[in-house]
Image: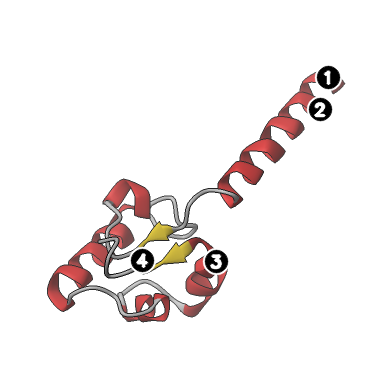
């Protein structure tokens, strides 16, 4: 049993390190599935992010995400390091 617990712990640790080293999520181009990787963003919030940018154009900063209904300051602060707006040449 202890061996299984150790294996699971190491696997989860490796997975979390992989996520933290992953490329940032571009909130101006990410699809729904990718946006759902953001902690606190499920299907409805991902759809709201996409709808907001379709209506208003690209986000000018990650902080603009707070304008999306359902996205609060805590969600923004928790995920800030993994989010980007990209660059105008990379779009």
Within 10 Å of disc 1 (Cα), the crowding (few <14, some 14-19, many 20+) is few
Q: Secondary structure at mark 3?
A: helix
Disc 3 or disc 1, which is closer to the eye?
3
Q: Residue at x 52, y 48 (%)?
A: 22
Q: CA distance from mark 4 to mark 2?
A: 39 Å
Q: Are marks 3 and 4 in contact (CB under 8 Å)?
A: no
Q: Are marks 2 and 1 in contact (CB under 8 Å)?
A: yes
Disc 3 or disc 4, which is closer to the eye?
4
Q: Which mark is residue 81?
A: 3
Q: Is residue 33 left or right of residue 58?
A: right
Within 10 Å of disc 3 (Cα), the crowding (few <14, some 14-19, many 20+) is few
Answer with mark 4 or mark 1, whichever residue precedes in sequence.
1
Disc 2 or disc 3, which is closer to the eye?
3
On-image quarter of the C terminus: bottom left
Q: Which residue is mark 4?
A: 86
Q: Which residue is mark 1?
A: 3
Q: Residue at x 44, y 76 (%)?
A: 72
Q: Residue at x 29, y 61 (%)?
A: 90
Answer with mark 4 or mark 2, whichever residue precedes in sequence.
2
The quadrant holding residue 30 is bottom left
Within 10 Å of disc 4 (Cα), the crowding (few <14, some 14-19, many 20+) is some
Q: Which residue is mark 2?
A: 6
Q: Secondary structure at mark 1?
A: helix
Residue 1 shows up from this direction: no
């Amino acid at each position: 049993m202890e061996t299984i617990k150790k294996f699971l712990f190491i696997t989860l640790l490796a997975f979390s390190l992989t996520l933290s080293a992953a490329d940032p999520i571009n909130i101006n181009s990410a699809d729904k599935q990718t946006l759902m990787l953001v902690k606190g963003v499920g299907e409805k919030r991902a759809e709201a992010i996409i709808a907001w940018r379709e209506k208003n154009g690209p986000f000018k900063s990650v902080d603009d995400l707070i304008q999306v209904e359902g996205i609060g300051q805590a969600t923004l602060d928790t995920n800030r390091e993994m989010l980007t707006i990209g660059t105008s040449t990379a779009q």
